[in-house]
Amino acid sequence: MSLVRLNIKGISYSQTQNGAYALILNEIEGDRKLPIVIGAFEAQSIAIALEKEIRPPRPLTHDLFKNFADRFDIVVKQVIIHKLVDGVFYSSLICERDKIEEIIDARTSDAIALALRFDAPIFTYKNILDKAGIYLKVDPKKDDEETEDSVLVDDILAGELEPAVSKEDYSSKSLEELHTLLEEAVNNEDYEKAASIRDEISKR
């Protein structure tokens, strides 16, 4: 089975599942997307890894794993989303230490959060992309734990990604005020707000 490389297109708040986020993966050499429902914590961790300029005051769980792996010379070489069963994705971390390769089972959301921190490529098999391209339905009666890392059916798939919250207007703030607000947002672990403030600073 041939592997297809993916990149991260974005994260959106799920309109159909309360408290869940949609992680949208895009095939690099094509237009198909792989939408995955993930929890709020994992969405925050992935968003922080994508926003290189935002540094949490204390390491998050995935940062701790990265620091631990660095200390013991363990490298995550790649992530493979290798199975899709009943709408749930299964992933593997391909790790290497002392030139010995190991395969470790992981939730897809955790695997991607780690792939970003190790600059590791993300792959899936072509047949999984073909299956998920049909946008399989998620049973809304299932609880959050069961539906996590499952295929998302949402209006998100039809067009643009909607932001999780409406962005506050920071255009009237001075640069000094923006830097103060950014520091406060990071200290309060409000990383979505911090990202909006950082975008406004970048525009200036």
Image (spheres, rainbow, N blue to C red):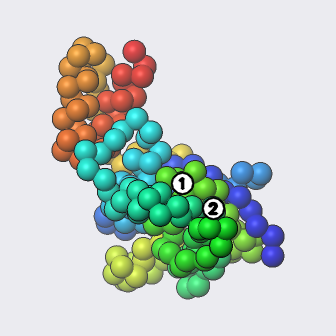
Q: Nearer the viewer, residue 49 or 153?
A: 49
Across and down, in percent, residue 68 comes to 41, 62
Few, some or many C-alpha atoms within 10 Å of disc 1 (few <14, some 14-19, many ≥20)? some
In this picture, residue 132 sits left or right of residue 114:
right
Helix, strand or loop status at disc 2: strand
Residue 158 in view = no
Give the residue drawn at x 62%, y 52%: 7
Check the image and name the residue furthest to the front: 98
Q: Amino acid at mark 2?
A: Lys
Question: Residue 118 got which mark?
Answer: 1
Q: Is residue 8 above or below residue 18?
A: above
User: Pointer 1 and pointer 2: residues touching (CB < 8 Å)?
Assistant: yes
Q: Earlier in the sequence, mark 1 or mark 2?
A: 2
* Number of numbered labels in the structure image: 2
Q: Is residue 52 visible?
A: yes
**Residue 67 position within the rendered picture, expressed as x and y whole percent measured from the top left:** 41, 56
- Residue 23, percent from left and from top: 49, 58
Residue that mark 2 sits on:
77
- Residue 175 placement: quadrant: top left
What residue sits 53% from the left and 64% below the top?
Answer: 74
Q: Is residue 118 above or below residue 192?
A: below
Q: CA distance from mark 1 to mark 2?
A: 8 Å
Quarter in which the N terminus is drawn? bottom right
Tell me if mark 2 has few (under 14), some (14-19) or many (20+) residues whose alpha carbon lies within 10 angstroms of its own.
Answer: some
The kind of residue tagged 1 is: Phe
